[in-house]
Image: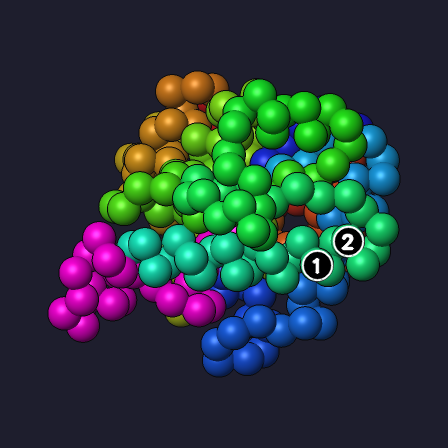
């Protein structure tokens, strides 16, 4: 395998499948099967999931809710998604651990860096919930931070789009895809890859990002094997 340890970032919206909100059990099962197949090769996998399919703090703030309160609600939404994926993974026979930045002892472990690394070394998939545990930070930032803390080789951002484009391919049919791009080129072209805090963390720590289509079965395995799909951000 090209990597020894990776962090997979999934958006909350990706769990909706074709639904308007909530969790599509078929989509979660597909993800679990793809993740298990890669895990069976020996790759160590950590996962961060967003919560936008259940609750989005920024949208609530626009509706008049206190931003801090809204962000904490969004963190709880990520825990619900994490529990759903944990259940699907364990039904495929994979051992997992859910660790959160907010203590919830009845359902998960508190995030402790050394313990998380030890779980990975013991061949458990580790799911990080509740973001960073702080308001004003996105799950993209949580993914970058956790990846750096556990010494991951790359952040793999699974989306419904097969890479980074010059414009939104769902809105602009003339948009062209980047196969490889540097961090500076992303800045210069104002491309929407991650929020700026998350992106800067990866750049400063020389952590490559790969954006790819997670909804296509088998793509995660191809990425793990080093196939050139999606878009690689480095340098």
Give residue 92's position: percent from left, percent from top. Answer: 83, 55
Total number of numbered discs in the rendering: 2
Give residue 85's position: percent from left, percent from top. Answer: 65, 57
Which of the 4 quarters of the picture holds residue 213? bottom right
Give residue 24's position: percent from left, percent from top. Answer: 62, 73
* Label at residue 87: 1
Residue 228 shows in the view? no
Q: Is residue 231 left or right of residue 4?
A: left
Q: Residue at x 51, y 34 (%)?
A: 111
Q: Is residue 4 left or right of residue 200?
A: right
Give residue 119's position: percent from left, percent from top. Answer: 69, 30
Q: Looking at the figure, which quarter contains the N terminus? A: top right
Cα distance in 3D space between marks 2 and 1: 5 Å
Tell me the element at label 1. Answer: helix
Looking at the image, which is closer to me, 226 or 96? 96
**What residue would you read off at disc 2?**
90
Residue 126 shows in the view? yes
User: Magenta span has 4?
Assistant: no
Q: Residue at x 53, y 46 (%)?
A: 105
Q: Is residue 196 left or right of residue 38?
A: left
Vertical placement of residue 167 versus 29, above or below? above
Vertical placement of residue 105 versus 217, above or below? above
Q: Counting other residues with Cα less than 10 Å from the Cα at mark 1, is it few (<14), some (14-19), or many (20 or more)?
A: some
Tell me the element at label 2. Answer: helix
Magenta-highlighted residues: 49-70
Whether the residues at callouts 2 and 1 have beta carbons within 8 Å, the answer is: yes
């Amino acid at each position: 395998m090209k990597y020894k340890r990776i962090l997979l970032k999934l958006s909350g919206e990706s769990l909706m499948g074709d639904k308007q909100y909530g969790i599509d059990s078929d989509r979660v099962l597909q993800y679990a099967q793809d993740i298990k197949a890669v895990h069976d090769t020996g790759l160590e996998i950590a996962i961060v999931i967003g919560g936008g399919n259940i609750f989005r703090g920024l949208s609530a703030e626009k509706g008049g809710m206190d931003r801090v309160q809204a962000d904490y609600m969004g963190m709880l939404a990520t825990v619900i998604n994490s529990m759903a994926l944990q259940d699907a993974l364990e039904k495929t026979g994979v051992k997992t651990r859910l660790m959160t930045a907010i203590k919830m002892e009845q359902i998960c472990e508190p995030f402790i860096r050394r313990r998380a690394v030890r779980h990975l070394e013991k061949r458990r998939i580790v799911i990080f919930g509740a973001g960073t545990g702080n308001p004003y930070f996105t799950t993209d930032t949580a993914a970058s931070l956790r990846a750096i803390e556990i010494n991951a080789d790359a952040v793999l951002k699974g989306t419904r789009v097969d890479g980074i484009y010059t414009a939104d391919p769902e809105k602009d049919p003339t948009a062209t895809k980047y196969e490889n791009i540097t961090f500076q080129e992303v800045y210069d072209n104002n491309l929407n890859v991650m929020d700026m805090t998350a992106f800067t963390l990866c750049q400063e720590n020389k952590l490559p990002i790969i954006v790819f289509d997670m909804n296509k079965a088998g793509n995660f395995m191809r990425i793990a094997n080093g196939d050139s799909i999606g878009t690689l951000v480095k340098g």
